[in-house]
Image: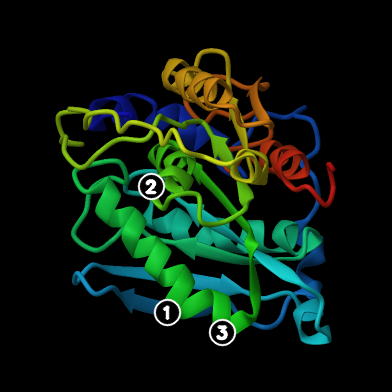
């Protein structure tokens, strides 16, 4: 997980990767932004508080096709630690890509009062997002619990990768971890000092159906400081018997320095193609 010092040291690099500040000659980004006409007007903003008093803000983008009765799943996006602006910005960028996969897009901001996704209450944060899904999203939009996809960046990718384990693999779908991804951890730790919570043991009673129902894709640049934790996570899930686990080193430089820009849209598009059984049986 990147420390505040690390995030500060790469700030200039990340600024160069934002739209409008890029280097000429980059490969073209997959143009899903042009498909936003396929979305209902929105996004829809909401706030949710669980039974333990944790509160989270979120926004939903709904494809027009949902009104026609097509089966849809959901794509949950978790921004990097402290990424409040990306909670809004990335939601707009991801929505049309999600629609291509018949997914409602939901961008979830860090729970109120927290500094990072992976400490100190990662199990509690997972229960919060699980409650958001069950009590607010799945029924309201008629979503398929076997098509719950998660993506995130940096600390948000750590959370996304561990979420299925924390909720007992109750959903099918997959994870696309961008510039991050870690093994499941118990509550504890301190994001300010980068004190990691202890590792959480992975369940040993997973059924063949569960092992086949959740797919993992990790995408990082070769010199991303979170490359080693993501490799460890991929090895953990492979060792546990999950049948679809992929780890990719993608073009770019540094932490979240994707060649196509900070949001890693091409990396996310390729990851969704891999983890979605409808496009990759």
- Circles 1 and 2 in contact, beta carbons < 8 Å: no
Vertical order, 150 against 73 (above or below): above
Task: Report the residue marked by disc 2.
Answer: 166
Q: Does residue 103 appear anywhere in the picture? A: yes
Q: CA distance from mark 1 to mark 3?
A: 13 Å
Drawn side of residue 191 relative to residue 41, left or right: left
Residue 177 position, x and y percent, is: 54, 37
Element on which disc 3 rests: helix
Q: Are there few (<14), some (14-19), or many (20+) residues within 10 Å of tag 1?
A: few
Element on which disc 1 rests: strand
Vertical order, 127 against 7 (above or below): below
- Circles 3 and 2 in contact, beta carbons < 8 Å: no
Drawn side of residue 18 relative to residue 124, left or right: right
Q: CA distance from mark 3 to mark 2?
A: 24 Å
Q: CA distance from mark 1 to mark 2?
A: 24 Å
| Label ID, residue 140 | 3
Q: Nearer the viewer, mark 1 or mark 2?
A: 2
- What's the residue at 80%, 83% (across, down)? 69
Task: Report the residue marked by disc 1.
Answer: 46
State the image quarter where residue 248 is shown: top right
Tally of numbered tags:
3
Q: Nearer the viewer, mark 3 or mark 2?
A: 2
- What's the residue at 78%, 43% (across, down)? 273
């Amino acid at each position: 997980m990147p420390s505040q010092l690390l995030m500060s040291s790469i700030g200039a690099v990340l600024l160069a990767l934002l739209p409008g500040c890029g280097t000429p000659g980059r490969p073209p980004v997959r143009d899903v932004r042009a498909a936003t006409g396929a979305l209902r007007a929105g996004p829809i903003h909401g706030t949710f508080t669980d039974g333990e008093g944790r509160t989270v803000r979120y926004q939903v983008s709904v494809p027009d096709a949902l009104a026609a009765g097509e089966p849809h799943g959901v794509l949950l996006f978790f921004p990097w630690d402290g990424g409040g602006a990306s909670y809004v910005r990335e939601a707009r960028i991801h929505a049309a890509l999600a629609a291509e996969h018949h997914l409602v897009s939901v961008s979830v901001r860090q729970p109120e009062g927290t500094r990072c996704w992976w400490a100190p209450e990662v199990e509690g944060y997972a229960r919060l997002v699980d409650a958001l899904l069950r009590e607010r999203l799945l029924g309201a939009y008629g979503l398929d619990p076997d098509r719950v996809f998660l993506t995130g960046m940096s600390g948000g990718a750590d959370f996304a990768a561990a979420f299925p384990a924390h909720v007992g693999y109750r959903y099918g779908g997959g994870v696309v971890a961008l510039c991050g991804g870690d093994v499941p951890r118990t509550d504890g730790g301190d994001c300010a000092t980068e004190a990691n919570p202890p590792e959480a043991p992975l369940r040993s009673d997973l059924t063949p159906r569960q092992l086949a129902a959740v797919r993992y894709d990790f995408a990082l640049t070769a010199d991303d400081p979170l490359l080693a934790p993501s490799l460890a996570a991929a090895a953990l899930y492979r060792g546990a018997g999950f049948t679809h686990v992929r780890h990719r080193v993608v073009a770019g430089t540094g932490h979240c320095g994707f060649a196509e820009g900070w949001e890693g849209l091409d990396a996310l598009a390729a990851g969704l193609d891999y983890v979605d059984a409808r496009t990759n049986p």
